[in-house]
Image (cartoon, rainbow, N blue to C red):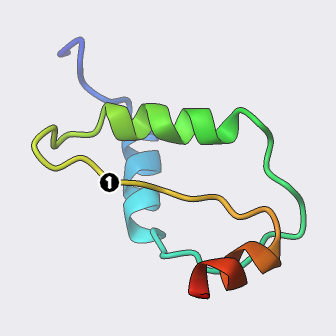
Amino acid sequence: MNQHAFTPEEKAAVYRAIYERRDIRSFLPDPIEEEVPLQIQGCLDNSVSRMKPPDDFQIFRFRFQISLLLL
């Protein structure tokens, strides 16, 4: 077995993430933990395409922040 091969469970998790991927534009009822944005940024920094990495992501903790962007 290739040392870099995914286990069946890892493969299933990757396929699930791909199939369930959504553009989320709604608020969650609970705040996210402080380390989550750092984990997301780490994933973005290690993305497959170094030529065109994701430009930016934003986390809004309050609804009024969105309205400020629209002004």
Q: Label 1: how many residues lie within 10 Å, few (<14), some (14-19) or many (20+)?
A: few
Which one is nearer the viewer's eye here, 6 or 48?
48
Q: Is residue 17 above or below residue 23?
A: above
**Residue with the most extreme front position:** 71
| On-image quarter of the N terminus | top left
For the point 24% across and 11% down, the residue is 3
For the point 48% across and 70% down, the residue is 20
Which one is nearer the viewer's eye here, 11 or 34?
34
| On-image quarter of the C terminus | bottom right
Percent of width and height locating residue 19: 40, 69
**Residue with the most extreme right position:** 30
For the point 42% across and 37% down, the residue is 43
Could you tell me the amino acid type at mark 1?
A: Asp
**Residue with the most extreme top position:** 3
In the picture provided, is 15 more to the left or to the right than 1? right
Q: Is residue 71 above or below residue 50?
A: below
Q: Secondary structure at mark 1?
A: loop
Percent of width and height locating residue 15: 37, 56
Which one is nearer the viewer's eye here, 48 or 68?
68
In the picture provided, is 67 more to the left or to the right than 56? right
Q: Quadrant of residue 38?
A: top right
Q: How many marks?
A: 1
Q: Is residue 47 above or below residue 55?
A: above
Percent of width and height locating residue 69: 60, 78
For the point 46% across and 31% down, the residue is 42
Kindly identify which residue carries mark 1. 55
In the picture provided, is 36 more to the left or to the right than 14? right
Q: Quadrant of residue 30?
A: bottom right
Q: Is residue 2 above or below residue 59?
A: above
